[in-house]
Structure formats: structure tokens, C-alpha cells
Amino acid sequence: MLFEQEVRIPLDRVGVLLGKEGSVKNQIEKLCDVKLEVDGKNGDVKIICKKNIEKADPFKAVEIVKAIGRGFSPDRALKLLNEDHTLEIIDLREYAGKSEDSLFRIKGRIIGLKGKARRVIEELTDVEIAVYGHTVSIIGNLEGVRMANEAVRMLAIGKSHNSVYNMLQKYRAKAKLEKYKLWEREYD
């Protein structure tokens, strides 16, 4: 079965996708068993898989290309190869409308002073976050991505950083308790 999908990434991210002497592109092709055709003039990337889709991983290749296009480093984007990791992209224009000032303010709230807000969300939910252009992208396991998504959306609508951090602390405590209960059941 033939798989072919095209993804457009910003022109300033094409060099990151290619890597030094094509190293990143080659790595993605090898790990996902696909071929990438990159158009450096308009940012179009074609992901092609001519093999059995069950033996290759073209869907992960699409996510990795999107992640690099949305501001992640190749190393962080390659975490999507982990079977339980996913990519979520939040368009901040939903919250800022057409106002560039509002978009700038919202991005500032999500990043925080010296990157603190982003770092706290990443640590409490065990995800990776990239703020690029008009989007916030998140890589991690489903539950972590869901909680980080909620935290980003709360900050985007103007909730206080403290209320977001408290919500995430409660989530983390609950997750630890669930993990402990699961571990306890295994040894009963």
C-alpha cells in the first residue's frame, strides 16, 4: 500500500528539518522507513512510504515533521517515536483573535518570566512544549499532553499562574497516588 502525505512547514524551519548535510532528514527516513521530499522554496515536505504501512511508520514521520515545523528541535521531535507519545498543536489565534498584541501577551503568559511557566508545565506534566509563531505545541504521553493542554488554555484565557500551577500539582499528586495503588495491587 502506498502512503503519501504533504505537510507545509515554515521556511525558517526547513534547515532544521534537513540538518547538517541532510543528517536529520536521513535519520527520520531511516527510523520511520519513509522518504522525505523537501521543497526548500515553499516549505512543502512530502512524506512517502512505498512499503507496508504496518512495517514502516509514516504517521510518526508526519508528526515528527510537523513538530520540527512548529519549533521543536529534532531531538525533542524524535521523542514522538515512543509508542505512547503524541503531538498536540494549539492555535493561539482562537484566544487572541487578529490582534498581534494579544497574541504576544498570551505567548508571554505561557512562556513566563525567563521561561518559568513553560518549564513548570513541562516538569509537572512530563511533556515538551514549543511556543512558535501563533501556536503552542506539546509532545508527551496522552495524559500529560491533556493536562498541559488544559494549563496552556487556562493561561491563554487569563487564569492566574498560581491557579494553573495548583491544578497541575493536584494532577501530579493524583497520578502518583494512582501509580502507587497500581503498584500495591501487583504485590497483593
Image (cartoon, grey):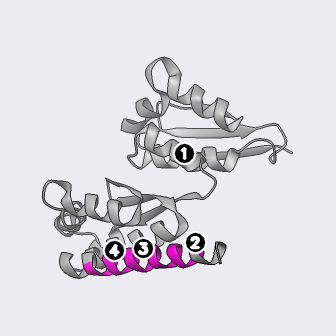
- Residue 12: give x, y in percent of width and height: 36, 37
Whether the residues at callouts 1 and 2 have beta carbons within 8 Å, the answer is: no
Label 4 vs 1, first from the N-terminus: 1
Q: For mark 4, what is the residue?
A: 151
Amino acid type at mark 1: Ile
Give the residues drawn in magenta, as a range: 166-183
Dot 3 corresponds to which residue? 147
* Visible residue check, residue 8: no
**Sequence-first tag of 4 and 2:** 4
Q: Residues within 10 Å of mark 4 (few under 14, many from 20)?
A: many
Q: What residue type is disc 4 on?
A: Ala
Look at the image and say whether residue 180 sits in the magenta stretch.
Answer: yes
Disc number at residue 64?
Answer: 1
Dots 4 and 3: beta carbons under 8 Å? yes
Q: CA distance from mark 4 to mark 3?
A: 6 Å
Q: Residues within 10 Å of mark 3 (few under 14, many from 20)?
A: many
